[in-house]
Structures are given as C-alpha cells and as structure tokens.
Image (cartoon, grey):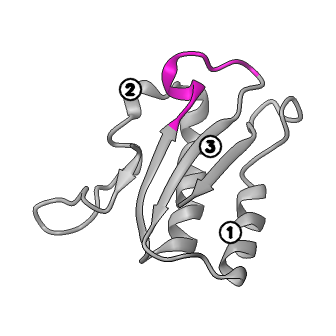
Amino acid sequence: MLWSSNDVTQQGSRPKTKLNIMREAVIAEVSTQLSEVVGVIERHLEPTLLAVHLYGSAVDGGLKPHSDIDLLVTVTVRLDETTRRALINDLLETSASPGESEILRAVEVTIV
C-alpha cells in the first residue's frame, strides 16, 4: 500500500511522503512518476480517498521496460462523471503508452 487514511502522525496529519510504506519495493525509475500520479489522485479524490495500493510487476520484481504501473484506489463514494473525467485527463498527463516515452510508463488505475 502506498498511502492510507490510517497513515497519520501523532499530530493527526498525513505523512510527509506518499511513498512511505512501499518505498523499498519501488525501483527508483518509477518512484518520481508514482509520486506525481498519487498527487493527482489525492487532488481529485480527497476527502473520499481511503488508500492507494501499488500492485503488479512494480512490487513483485517483474517490472520490464514496457511494464505499466498498476494502482488500486479505494474511495468512500462512487465518483461522479465530472470528477472521473477530470481525473482521467490529469492522469493522462502523468502517463504514456508502453514504449512511447523514455521517462513515463503507462499507468493503470482501478478505483473501487
């Protein structure tokens, strides 16, 4: 899990880094993009955001040059169409089709 609403400091605020839990499992080449993607998700889904889970090849050791980044996002309410479209548009700015970019990977976000 990358981030959860349960991840709070003693002062009641969220941790300073979004990647505090899985940092060791995420290779350096995706951590910057991952941080940007999580930032977009937070911006659009707060205060309904419960957790962002990283899964797939990025955590199981099978990340290849054209592998995507898989995220499972948990929210408390269903997304309305306006929020969904805005989120998709912003996520497209932080993603690229496989093999299209030397810097960005494809990002697959599933929201439940």
Magenta residue span: 55-65
Q: Decide whether residue 107 is among the magenta residues.
A: no
Q: Which residue is mark 2?
A: 24
Q: CA distance from mark 1 to mark 3?
A: 16 Å
Q: Position of residue 18 (x, y in %)?
A: 40, 51
19 or 84, which is in the foreground?
Answer: 84
Between disc 1 and disc 3, the foreground one is 1
Mark 3 belongs to which amino acid? Gln
C-alpha gap between disc 2 and disc 3: 15 Å
Question: What residue type is disc 2 on?
Answer: Glu
Disc 3 target residue:
33
Q: Is 2 situated above or below 65? A: below
Percent coordinates x, y for residue 88 in the rendering: 74, 64
* SS under mark 1: helix
Tag shown at residue 87: 1
Residues at discs 2 and 3 in contact (Cβ within 8 Å) = no
Dot 3: element: helix
Residue 8, above or below 27: below
Badge 3 crowding class, 10 Å Cα cut-off, few under 14, some 14 to 19, many 20 or more, is some
Does residue 2 appear to the left or right of 12 in the view shown? right
CB of mark 1 within 8 Å of CB of mark 3? no
Q: Position of residue 8 (x, y in %)?
A: 21, 60
Instruction: Name the front one of labels 1 and 2.
Output: 1
> Residue at left 56%, top 46%?
71
Residue type, numbered disc 1: Leu
First in sequence: mark 1 or mark 2?
2
**Residue at horizontal 62 percent and vertical 43 percent from the top:** 33
